[in-house]
Image (cartoon, coloured by chain):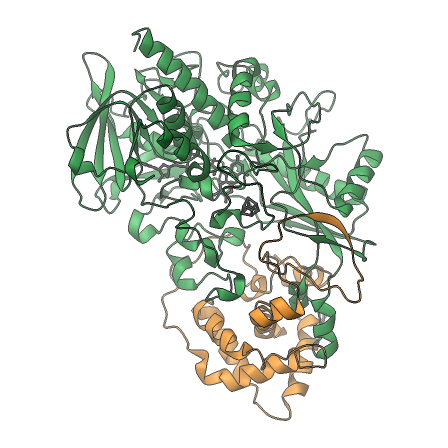
């Protein structure tokens, strides 16, 4: 694949049909679709190279210097990386603030970034669900923010399109608010989850729980093997058994012969031409040499991840609009959203002592939203939440929470313990104009560029929802038959859900939105933003599959428009 | 979080490695709080405590007919590495202070028994809990159970399982946790 890599200064004068900014989940899709439609594409990635298989970690726990525990030295340069993400084997994947710069926090914020080829596509949890009209109609029905300019029927064929390529395992459940897709065979619930599933439906009026839908292969596809049950996906999968830029979209784009890729290439701004009212290309900073270059193209796809794409827009065309390209509506940078979480319950499931699990399944259970769905009406808040989790047999680490020591203690904790059920809630965050990001021109990154300033928090609707998320979690544990239920609410800083969305929303009116229904910037129609920035509301459902579908849909529109010479 | 309350519910638990004694040694700061970037004080090197740490480990996880002991798998060296590199200076100081009260010798087992009882006794007032002991116990378990010999011989670690069976019948008296620490 090395032939796709280019060195910026060796190809200084080159012009492309399309430029894609960012190589993560969204950028990978943009590059694949654009190159497959015959366009010559330059993909620009600010981070360094991270090659499929060659650069993956394959050590066993016992081979690691700190046995998977992150060191303090690695942690203090990555203050946002806490709890389960803070693991030795992935620490180097996350942004080092001393090298990439800090951002400013008006209110506490966590920005979980990975700047390298593939972005967070190699690190993600792969949970993949369709959104529905429960989501796309909600703003209009409730008079919140602005209406989505699309409905489920507009995106459904694009979900089909991306799912067939990605490979999503899951079970068809026939739910209109969590539509079924093009599924590979599902992973299997374990014995305790099966019992809990049955008990939940019996005790709570048919409430649903099923295996999480994930972008992990249960059957091999071309060039990729099926999952081998190691559940170490975020260290990179040697079998290519889960979807990432590296395993999937990059090889497909490279195969066309139409892709050029430059790493260490930070896009600083979109070049804007006042006369044609269009972008002419982008400015790129080579992070290794500090040189800047200008690249020309007919269209630009901003896929740098939600807040970074908005950062690029804010830095662009500032001679025309002080707030940057796309700011004419006054909404650029506003309506930051996330999924609020850090709400957990644990319960001990009695019995099943003589059962265990073999293999590490790369997914858990999913409980789709039920609050404010159909006849279920909650008075304290709008929207709803879903749950992920699962049952597992306790391992030796329970010993540090148990009294005792000596030979019998060692023997006891070496054996499998009780099964425990864990539930983790993910709640929707409403779009709110006052939740915003701005450019902080006082504080600069290591290249002298202004940093983002984060000013966003959970509001009353989310706080009311959190209470219910916990109560419902406990009620479901009780329905499972769990004992000794523990509740943990660690609080939620915006961003920590790693589903940061909004800041350049889609809409129907250029006066109140940044992008139109085809993800075109109203102020520069040959610039497309197809990552999380474009979202008009947040749903409570993991968003990345929707970024993929919107990206493929926007590429199709862009190429059709180019053919008709409308761009 | 109220230390006592959290300790109570944690002692009714479970093998969830992310509910850990670290909750206490960080003064029960919610685990979701940002890493403290101001931790710049000089690191403590625990190499000089190797003998004592190895002995504490061997008391908690001794050799038996069934299992190798903490010393046999060089648990002490691993423990020193963890304490040196993975604990903040605040945590290190607390552990060092705790170790000062112990000496490697005949009385050590009795001291450990007292510490273990006090740490897990829900009636011990929060400010009198030997928090350092909880942290040490966790690090000792980690050092031992992630050892190659222990993982492959005591536990049944398989690098590439290749398949999944969520309803595997086992003899609970003989079955060891295969995937301690998420492989
Ligand atoms: C641990 C973890 C678990 C997750 N689990 C799930 C899940 O289960 N389901 C789900 O739907 N989502 C999940 N997510 C979120 C998911 O990873 C993101 O939604 C997704 O990666 C977003 O894709 P993206 O392409 O927009 O951004 P990214 O994947 O972050 O890629 C953006 C890329 O752009 C580059 N870039 C940034 N700025 C510039 C610039 N100025 N110039 C050039 N390049 C630039 C970055 O370096 C990066 O490579 C998870 C994330 C993490 C970290
Ligand atoms: S669990 Fe499956 S997809 Fe994940 S790393 Fe292992 S083999 Fe690959």
Q: Is residue A309 visible?
A: yes
Q: Nearer the viewer, residue B107 or A305?
A: A305
When asked about the image quadrant of residue A277, the answer is top left
Left or right: where B21 falls relative to A280: right
Q: Tell me what hue chain B is rendered in.
A: orange
User: How many discs appear?
Assistant: 0
Q: Nearer the viewer, residue A545 or A430?
A: A545
Residue at image coords 42%, 28%: A29
Q: Position of residue A408 (x, y in %)?
A: 75, 76
Q: Position of residue A109 (x, y in %)?
A: 44, 43
| Chain the render paints green | A
> In the displayed structure, would residue A531 be above or below residue A96?
above
Q: Quadrant of the N terminus of chain A?
A: top left
Q: Nearer the viewer, residue A296 or A479?
A: A296
Q: Quadrant of ligand 1?
A: top left
Residue at image coords 72%, 79%: A407
Q: Position of residue B47 (x, y in %)?
A: 44, 81
Q: Nearer the viewer, residue A545 or A218?
A: A218
> In the displayed structure, would residue A519 be above or below residue A502?
above
When asked about the image quadrant of residue A44, the answer is top left
């Amino acid at each position: 694949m090395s032939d796709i890599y280019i060195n910026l200064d060796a190809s200084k004068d080159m012009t492309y049909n399309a430029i894609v900014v960012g190589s993560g989940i969204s950028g990978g899709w943009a590059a694949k679709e654009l190159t497959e439609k015959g366009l010559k594409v330059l993909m620009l990635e600010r981070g360094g190279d991270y090659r499929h298989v060659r650069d993956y970690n394959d050590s066993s726990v016992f081979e690691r210097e700190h046995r998977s525990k992150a060191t303090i030295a690695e942690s203090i340069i990555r203050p946002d990386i806490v709890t389960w993400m803070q693991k030795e084997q992935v620490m180097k994947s996350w942004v080092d603030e001393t090298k990439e710069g800090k951002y400013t926090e008006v209110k506490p914020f966590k920005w979980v970034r990975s700047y390298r080829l593939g972005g967070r596509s190699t690190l993600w949890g792969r949970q993949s669900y369709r959104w529905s009209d429960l989501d796309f109609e909600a703003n209009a029905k409730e008079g919140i923010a602005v209406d989505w300019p699309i409905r489920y029927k507009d995106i459904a064929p694009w979900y089909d399109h991306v799912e067939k390529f990605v490979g999503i395992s899951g079970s068809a459940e026939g739910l209109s608010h969590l539509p079924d897709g093009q599924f590979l065979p599902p992973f299997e619930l374990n014995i305790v989850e099966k019992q809990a599933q049955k008990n939940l439906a019996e005790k709570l009026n048919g409430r649903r729980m099923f295996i999480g839908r994930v972008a992990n292969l249960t059957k091999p596809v071309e060039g990729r093997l099926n999952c081998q049950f190691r559940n170490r996906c975020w260290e990179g999968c040697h079998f290519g058994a889960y979807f990432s830029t590296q395993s999937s979209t990059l090889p497909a784009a490279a195969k066309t012969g139409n892709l050029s890729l430059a790493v260490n290439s930070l896009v600083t701004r979109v070049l804007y031409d006042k006369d044609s009212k269009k972008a002419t290309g982008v400015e790129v900073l080579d992070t290794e040499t500090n040189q800047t270059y200008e690249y020309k193209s007919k269209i630009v796809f901003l896929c740098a991840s939600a807040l970074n794409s908005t950062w690029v827009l804010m830095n662009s065309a500032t001679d025309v609009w002080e707030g940057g390209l796309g700011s004419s509506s006054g909404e650029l940078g506003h309506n930051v959203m996330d999924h609020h979480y850090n709400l957990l319950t644990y319960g001990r499931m009695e019995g099943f002592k003589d059962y265990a699990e073999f293999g590490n399944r790369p997914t858990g259970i999913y409980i789709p939203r039920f609050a404010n769905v159909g006849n279920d009406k909650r008075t304290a808040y709008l929207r709803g939440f879903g749950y992920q989790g699962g049952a597992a047999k306790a391992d030796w680490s329970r010993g540090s929470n148990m009294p005792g020591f000596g030979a019998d203690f060692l023997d006891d904790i070496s054996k499998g313990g009780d099964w425990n059920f864990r539930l983790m809630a993910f709640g929707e965050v409403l779009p709110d104009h006052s939740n915003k990001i701005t450019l902080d021109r006082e504080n600069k990154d290591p290249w002298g560029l202004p940093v983002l300033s984060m000013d966003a928090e959970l509001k009353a609707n989310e706080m009311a929802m959190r209470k219910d998320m916990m109560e419902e979690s406990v009620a479901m544990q009780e329905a499972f038959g769990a004992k000794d239920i523990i509740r943990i609410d660690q609080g939620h800083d915006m961003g920590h859900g790693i589903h940061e969305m909004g800041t350049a929303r889609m809409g129907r009116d250029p006066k109140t939105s940044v992008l139109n229904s085809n993800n075109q910037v109203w102020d520069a129609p040959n610039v497309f933003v197809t990552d999380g920035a474009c979202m008009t509301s947040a749903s409570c459902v993991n968003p990345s599959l929707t970024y993929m579908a919107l990206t493929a849909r926007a590429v199709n529109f862009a190429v059709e428009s180019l053919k008709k010479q409308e761009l | 979080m109220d230390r006592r309350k959290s300790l109570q519910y944690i002692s009714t638990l479970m093998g969830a490695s992310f509910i850990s004694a670290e909750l206490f040694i960080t003064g029960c700061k919610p685990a979701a709080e940002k890493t403290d970037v101001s931790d710049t004080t000089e690191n403590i090197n625990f190499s000089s405590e190797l003998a004592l740490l190895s002995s504490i480990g061997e008391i908690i996880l001794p050799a038996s007919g069934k299992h190798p002991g903490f010393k046999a798998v060089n648990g002490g060296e691993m423990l020193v590495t963890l304490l040196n590199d993975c604990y903040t200076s605040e945590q290190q100081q607390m552990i060092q202070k705790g170790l000062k009260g112990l000496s490697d010798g005949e009385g050590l087992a009795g001291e450990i028994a007292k510490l273990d009882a006090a740490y897990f006794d829900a009636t011990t007032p929060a400010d009198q809990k030997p928090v350092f002991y909880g942290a040490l116990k966790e690090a000792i378990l980690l050092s031992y159970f992630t050892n190659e010999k222990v993982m492959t011989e005591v536990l049944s670690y398989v690098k590439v399982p290749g398949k999944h069976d969520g309803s595997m019948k086992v003899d609970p008296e003989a079955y060891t946790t295969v995937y301690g620490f998420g492989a």
